[in-house]
Image: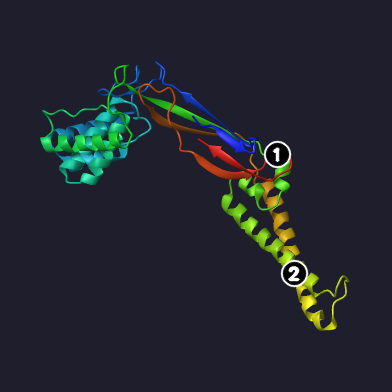
Amino acid sequence: MIVTLTLPLRRLRHVLTLVLLATASGAVTVGGGSSARAAEAPLPSDLTARIEEGEAAFRIQNYEKVVEALDRLAGHPLLEGRSEHLRVLEMLAASHWFLGARDSARLVFGQLLRESPFHKLDAFVYPPELLSFFDTRKRELVQGGIIPANPGPDGGATRRVLVREVSADATPTIAYFAPFGIGQFANGEDGKGTGLAIIQGVGMATMAATWIGIETLKIGDTNRIAESDRGQARLLEALWYGGMVVTVASWTYGIIDGFVNRDTRPRVEERWELLEPGRTTPVTQAPTVRLVPGPGDLGGVGLDVSF
């Protein structure tokens, strides 16, 4: 679940996460030995031919040919969630192991276990060393909290769910007139916003410092300056105007740039995630904190906390 909270109490960017659980017509169930969709559509002929080529090479222990035929099929969008994909990953990982490419074998076995956490290798097909390598990789993923250690009460099926995240920018128009790159932060351009904030901060600091310097040159409570300090006063005055030009120019640029790059269209992001047994929603992201425009129509700066 994603919850967005803006402090002070005002949400400027609304995030909606929809979790679409697998259904019978398009379900993807992984675990316990490679259960597939209830009704799998036929694969394209070129994919079927590549899989058959890899199967034939694997049977005669031509592992170089297996890697050549199946390497590009790992993670193929048309294979994900299908029993054929689990077989492809198993043959590919085992072939890497037999060829001595242990890092590649570890990577592909990890991909296989993420999709099917309770997948088992046939002890009559593979040597004990390979089975031990596979079990070690599985323990690493369990200890890292990436896959569950034991099947759940529903028979151990770890479901794959489609997480759809819809976000829309609801930043009020008045916020784009605020200084210090607030409009850029609202548009997600943190680097540009930081740069404008620094430039405007330097400009305002210059104006404040030179104003104080001129005030200290005045005689008593008057606005007169001694003749000997006239040159210094003119220099400070020029610096004050320079700071003002920098501040106003960068502020104006920030306003224009903020409106030009403002995007109020809803953004949709989709991704597949594993749903552990006993859970109704996947864990999608770690808590994050970022600066956003402040609440209401008065501008300012707030905190956007997502968890």
- Residue 65, image x and y in percent? 20, 41
Q: Which residue is mark 1?
A: 172
Question: Residue sitting at 75 percent across and 63 percent down?
Answer: 244
Residue 276 visible to an observer of this rendering? yes
Outermost residue on the front side: it is 220
Query: How packed is label 1: few (under 14 Cα within 10 Å), some, or many (20 or more)?
Result: some
Q: Amino acid at mark 2?
A: Thr
Q: Tell me the kind of residue under disc 1.
A: Pro
Give the vertical position of 263 relative to 245 (above or below): above
* Gap in angstroms between the C-alphas marked 2 and 1: 35 Å
Q: Nearer the viewer, residue 107 or 206?
A: 206
State the image coordinates of residue 258 (x, y, percent, origin top left). Answer: 67, 48
**Residue 117, horizontal then vertical, whole percent:** 28, 29
Q: Residue at x 23, y 41 (%)?
A: 105
Relative to residue 307, is residue 205 depicted above or below? Answer: below
Residue 205 found in image quarter: bottom right
- The numbered mark at residue 210 is 2
Other residues around mark 2 within 10 Å, as few (<14) / some (14–19) / many (≥20): many
